[in-house]
Image (cartoon, grey):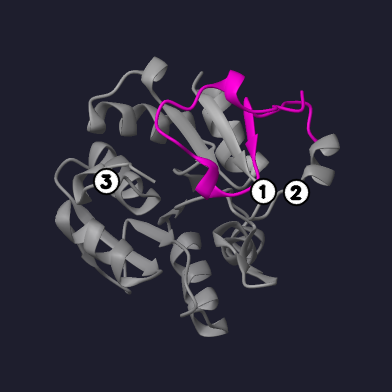
Amino acid sequence: MGINVEETHFYTSALATASFMKKSSPRGGSAYVIGEPGLISALYDEGFTMNDHNPEWVVVGETRNYSYEKIEHAVHLVRAGARLLGTNCDTKDRMGASFVPGCAALIKPIEMVAEVDAYFVGKPNPMIMRTALNQLGVKRADTIVIGDRMDTDILGGMQANITTALILTGVTKCSDLKRFAYRPDIILPTIGHIVPGLHPSDADSSN
């Protein structure tokens, strides 16, 4: 694709969650995590330890390592005072020709039983967009948010006043656009259609 990407160019919802927690608790703290090793590693890097007894935070991310026992324990910890965080608002993720539960679906039982609302750090939260821009050292005018979901990727970019591109190989299809009051700036069939210097005038936005 002619795009030079290095490890330092990646800013994930796990990194954003760890950064948010660090700002809220500068001295670090502890967390009970339902998620994958990448999330746990990001929290460790910001000075947080894992604690399944009396943590300050319960953090839920994308994972296949999910069980009734973990839900039950998370509910107990949240009701005891731990703050509940979700890394992103995705209700489902594409897996081949089907879908699997996303973070928002996994965290919902905890919210319902503990009777609290989780705070979601990732898209469409504008905070992750602002932090990513600062982290990468780029301006809004030189940035494009590319994603396959209208309700997180495109909404997040729009709310951060960044050009957006919807890729149709993921969750949102053209037939779904009528359900949304907003539109992406660009619609592309596949990620392979992204080229350096892409501009909204280069593609039909179907507005």
Which amino acid, by three-letter code, is at mark 3?
Val
Counting residues from the N terminus, which is met first, the one under dot 3 or under dot 2? 3
Residue displayed at 23% across by 25% down = 137
State which quadrant residue 110 falls in.
bottom right
Is 47 displayed left or right of 144 in the figure?
A: left
Whether residue 118 is visible = no
Q: Is residue 159 depicted above or below 132 in this figure?
A: above
Counting residues from the N terminus, which is met first, the one under dot 1 or under dot 2? 1
Q: In the rendering, at what x and y percent does residue 27 appear?
A: 14, 45
User: Label 1 to label 3, Cα distance in Å?
Assistant: 22 Å
Q: Which residue is mark 1?
A: 168
State which quadrant residue 98 falls in.
bottom right
User: Cβ–Cβ below 8 Å for labels 1 and 2?
Assistant: yes
Which amino acid, by three-letter code, is at mark 1?
Leu
User: Cβ–Cβ below 8 Å for labels 3 and 2?
Assistant: no
Whether residue 136 is visible = yes
User: Label 3 to label 2, Cα distance in Å?
Assistant: 27 Å
Magenta stretch, overall SS:
loop
Work out whether residue 8 or residue 107 is closer to the camera in this orientation and state it: 8
Q: Is residue 68 magenta?
A: no
Q: Which mark is residue 5?
A: 3
Q: In the rendering, at what x and y percent does residue 99 appear?
A: 67, 69
Q: Is residue 179 depicted above or below 39 in this figure?
A: above
Q: In the rendering, at what x and y percent does residue 157 appear?
A: 52, 29
Q: Is residue 203 depicted above or below 64 in this figure?
A: above
Q: Which residues are magenta?
A: 180-207
Label 3: which secondary element:
loop
Residue displayed at 37% across by 26% down = 130
Q: Which mark is residue 173?
A: 2
Label 1: which secondary element:
loop
Q: In the rendering, at what x and y percent does residue 189 appear?
A: 65, 46
Q: Is residue 190 magenta?
A: yes
